[in-house]
Amino acid sequence: MNEERILKREPIFQGRVIDVGLETVELPNGRQVDLEIIRHPGGAAAVALDAQSRVCLLRQFRHAGNGWLWELPAGKIDPGESPLTTATRELAEEAGVTAADWIDLGFMHSSPGVFTEIIYLWLARDLAISAHDHGVDEVIEVHWLPLNQALDWCNDGTITDAKTLIGLYRAGALLNSALELIPEEPGC
């Protein structure tokens, strides 16, 4: 965030996760405007893919989402924590999975009109199963399904969570481009 463009900030609400304020900012065109901004520490999500090309999806109850949603294991970045550390921690806590191989899938902005949250996305492979540790505020079912089925769910509207859509699409594109790089053997 361009802190130098913030001329004034009036706090409205300070919660455990978010900080809401009315910010007077100078836009690149020189105009000054008042914006309601929600500050968030960011998050990280893991596309965990096993040796059978199945992806780990959580079916999680989300009050703000009005019910059950399909999501990648993900969570908020804690103070002093790197995005990869967050993704590793959340994959273990929510899905009961550890990974030896991590590939950066980039990041995404959740809702940049009002929200400072950035979510970092990772492809996790070479997996091992461990015990999950769901929080008291989490109602989660862990599911494994073929990556192609998850991508179909992205296309048909079954999956609506933005980080999950983007993470799955990016992982699918990365894996497809890697397959295109494998030379065919003569006579195939």
Image (spheres, grey):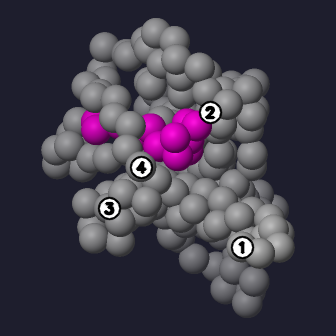
Q: For residue 39, say whether it is visible.
A: no
Residue 119 picture location, percent across and down: 60, 49
Q: Residues within 10 Å of mark 4 (few under 14, many from 20)?
A: some
**Which residue position holds label 3?**
153
**Which residue position holds label 1?**
188
Q: Residues within 10 Å of mark 2 (few under 14, many from 20)?
A: many
Q: Nearer the viewer, mark 4 or mark 2?
A: 4
Q: For residue 158, say whether it is visible.
A: yes
What are the residue bounds of the magenta stretch?
A: 47-60
Number of the label disc, if any, that sits on residue 146: 4
Q: The residue under label 4 is which amino acid type? A: Pro
Q: Quadrant of the C terminus?
A: bottom right
The residue closer to the viewer here, 50 or 20, is 50
Q: Quadrant of residue 41?
A: top right
Q: Earlier in the sequence, mark 2 or mark 3?
A: 2
Q: Quadrant of residue 162?
A: bottom left
